[in-house]
Amino acid sequence: MDRYDQAAETSETANLYFRKLIKGINVTDQEEWEKGIQDAESNRMRDRSVMDILGAHQPEDQSAAPSQTNSNMSRRSVAGWIQLGIDIEEKQ
């Protein structure tokens, strides 16, 4: 198998995996995720801090109410999706 065929196969495998993965994500979350990635990519040369699209900042109040905890869990879930997308994109 030459390198082109291997790259094409790897790309197809990544696309299939990605399609299965996004099947379970809320459409609004997916659109927000994709917009965040596009914004970061278009602005990264001017401001590197935009690449922190994972929201790595911890909330200052660790005694969050249950609704805040659910929101934080949702953000971590979105962050996981974003990181996976970045990993896949970098490997292509």
Image (spheres, helix red, strand yellow):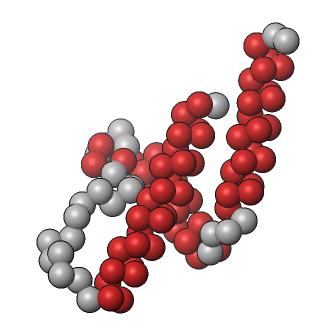
**In the rendering, at what x and y percent does residue 81 appear?**
53, 57
Q: Does residue 15 show up?
A: yes
Quarter of the image for residue 9 reads top right
Q: Residue furthest top?
A: 2
The one nearer the camera, 70 or 27, is 70
The one nearer the camera, 1 or 48, is 1
Indicate whether 65 appears above or below 44. Answer: below
Who's the residue at 60% across and 40% down the image? 88
Q: Quadrant of the C terminus?
A: top right
Report the label total: 0
Q: Residue furthest left?
A: 60
Q: On the picture, is 63 further left or further right than 42?
A: left
**In the rendering, at what x and y percent does residue 64 appear?**
23, 83
Who's the residue at 35% across and 89% down the image? 67
Q: On the picture, is 31 further left or further right than 19?
A: left
Who's the residue at 78% across and 20% down the image? 6
Quarter of the image for residue 21 reads bottom right
Indicate whether 85 appears above or below 77. Answer: above
Q: On the picture, is 30 further left or further right than 65?
A: right
Indicate whether 52 appears above or below 64. Answer: above
Q: Quadrant of the N terminus?
A: top right
Q: Does residue 35 show up?
A: no
Who's the residue at 74% across and 34% down the image? 11
**In the rendering, at what x and y percent does residue 15 appear?**
74, 45
